[in-house]
């Protein structure tokens, strides 16, 4: 058995972390399409281009976002507000022309500017010597190039953290959610090649709190999307205590994931830990007792809450790198499983393993 589940950014495919981040943020149809194509997502840049191209095509079919923007003109048929100072400065009094400004409904909106800027960055395909057929990355780059040309009336801007962070919220924000996500990654990584993608992954992995929450949300959203069970986090309450003051001091019982099938229930507790095993007496490796006790408390409260349902099973799930641990244990009267999810696996293999952990008999 290995002693550590140290998650090193150089070992994890950046595309895998990006997919985890997509799942943790929102369930996205664009991601499902990329997963269906085994040729897509071989590196960080290609996956970003695929995501942006498919998201942009969906937005285009529904109609580009439109909004009112301020325009200024100088002519003999003014509309809107007359700009007296500008008119005098440009000699309009002698030519019977007036400077004026007006609002016009057009496609030059903040989201479209960000989309165009991101598409320009990713529209340069990477060519490989000796390749006669168009690669997936080239086809996505071609699609993004068409988007840039179609948005020729949209202002050219430079992607910056301030620009992406200041995008307005509203109905359009949901339609452009993938565009915004890709744009955020582009400004974080500066140039989306594999090396910069690794820098993004390193920053993510060094933030243990962010990684813990991301992993928990990923497992929850994945289970909701890919299992037939009813899936949601659950909050249990302790049995009655002698006084409200005592009840207030009891720790919370908040599960990460509970899957309820027709005749089965599985409680999944996700743990992002620097070490999979704790050190016992004589430096002996053993499971973390606090994690087992926590899972046992959840199983006990689930049984008390639903006494007529079959007895639940438990799963302690740890992310790992090039590590495989899978043990079935008994915590009378419950059965549980302690397992790792290897984040270095090819995405299709990672999904197959997770499917089995979530739904197979423990």
Image (cartoon, rainbow, N blue to C red):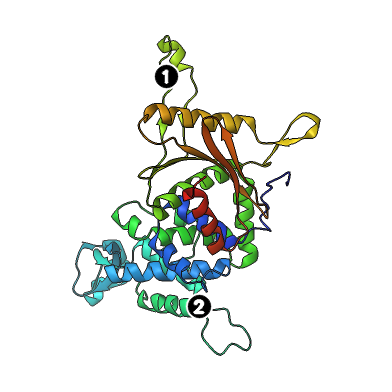
Q: For the residues marked 1 and 2, what is the alpha-carbon distance in whole angstroms? A: 57 Å
Residue shown at the point (49%, 70%) measured from the top left: 49
Q: Secondary structure at mark 1?
A: loop
Residue shown at the point (52%, 50%) measured from the top left: 357
Which percent across, then down, holds residue 179?
Answer: 42, 62
The circle drawn on residue 10 is none
Residue 293 visible in image: yes
Residue 155 visible in image: no
Q: Nearer the viewer, residue 262 or 82?
A: 262
Which percent across, then down, holds residue 327?
Answer: 62, 44
Which percent across, then down, holds residue 104?
Answer: 24, 66
Residue shown at the point (67%, 42%) measured from the top left: 274
Q: Nearer the viewer, residue 257 or 287?
A: 287
Please state if 140 lies on the left or on the right of 196 as rendered.
Answer: left
**Residue 221 versus residue 12 in the image, above or below:** above
Residue shown at the point (27%, 72%) measured from the top left: 74
Q: Nearer the viewer, residue 73 or 208?
A: 208
Badge 1 or badge 2: first in the primary sequence: 2
The circle drawn on residue 136 is 2
Please state if 182 lies on the left or on the right of 84 as rendered.
Answer: right
Q: Based on the displayed image, in which of its 4 quarters is residue 284 positioned?
A: top right
Label 1, residues with CA under 10 Å away: few <14, some 14-19, many ≥20: few
Q: Which residue is mark 1?
A: 239
User: Which of the two marks, 1 or 2, is nearer to us in this view?
Assistant: 1
Find out whether the residues at labels 1 and 2 contact each other: C-beta distance under 8 Å. no
Q: Secondary structure at mark 2?
A: helix
Q: Residue furthest top?
A: 242
**Residue 171 versus residue 312 in the image, above or below:** below
Label 2, residues with CA under 10 Å away: few <14, some 14-19, many ≥20: some
């Amino acid at each position: 058995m290995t002693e550590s589940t140290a998650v090193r950014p150089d070992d994890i495919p950046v595309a895998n972390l990006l997919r985890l981040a997509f799942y943790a943020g929102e369930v996205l149809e664009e991601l499902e399409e990329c997963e269906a194509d085994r040729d897509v997502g071989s590196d960080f840049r290609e996956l970003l281009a695929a995501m942006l191209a498919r998201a942009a095509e969906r937005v285009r079919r529904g109609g580009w976002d439109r909004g009112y923007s301020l325009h200024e003109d100088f002519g003999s048929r003014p509309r809107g507000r007359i700009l007296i100072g500008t008119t005098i400065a440009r000699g309009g009094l002698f030519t019977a022309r007036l400077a004026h400004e007006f609002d016009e409904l057009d496609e030059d909106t903040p989201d479209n500017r960000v989309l165009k800027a991101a598409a320009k960055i990713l529209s340069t395909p990477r060519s490989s010597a000796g390749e006669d057929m168009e690669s997936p990355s080239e086809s996505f780059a071609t699609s993004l190039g068409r988007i840039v040309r179609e948005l020729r009336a949209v202002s050219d801007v430079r992607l910056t953290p301030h620009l992406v962070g200041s995008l307005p919220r509203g109905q359009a924000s949901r339609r452009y959610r993938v565009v915004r996500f890709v744009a955020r990654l582009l400004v974080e990584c500066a140039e989306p090649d594999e090396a910069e993608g690794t820098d993004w992954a390193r920053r993510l992995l060094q933030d243990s709190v962010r990684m813990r929450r991301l992993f928990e949300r990923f497992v929850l959203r994945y289970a909701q999307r890919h299992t037939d069970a009813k899936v949601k986090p659950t909050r249990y309450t302790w049995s009655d205590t002698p006084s409200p003051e005592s009840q207030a001091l009891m720790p919370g019982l908040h599960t990460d994931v509970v899957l309820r099938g027709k005749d089965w229930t599985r409680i999944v507790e996700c743990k992002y830990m620097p070490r999979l095993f704790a050190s016992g007496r004589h430096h002996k490796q053993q499971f973390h007792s606090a994690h087992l006790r926590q899972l046992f408390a959840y199983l006990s409260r689930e049984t008390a809450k639903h006494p007529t349902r079959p007895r639940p099973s438990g799963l302690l799930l740890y992310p790992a790198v090039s590590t495989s641990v899978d043990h079935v244990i008994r915590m009378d009267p419950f059965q549980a499983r302690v397992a790792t999810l290897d984040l270095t696996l090819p995405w299709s293999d990672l999904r197959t393993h997770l499917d089995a952990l979530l739904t197979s008999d423990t």
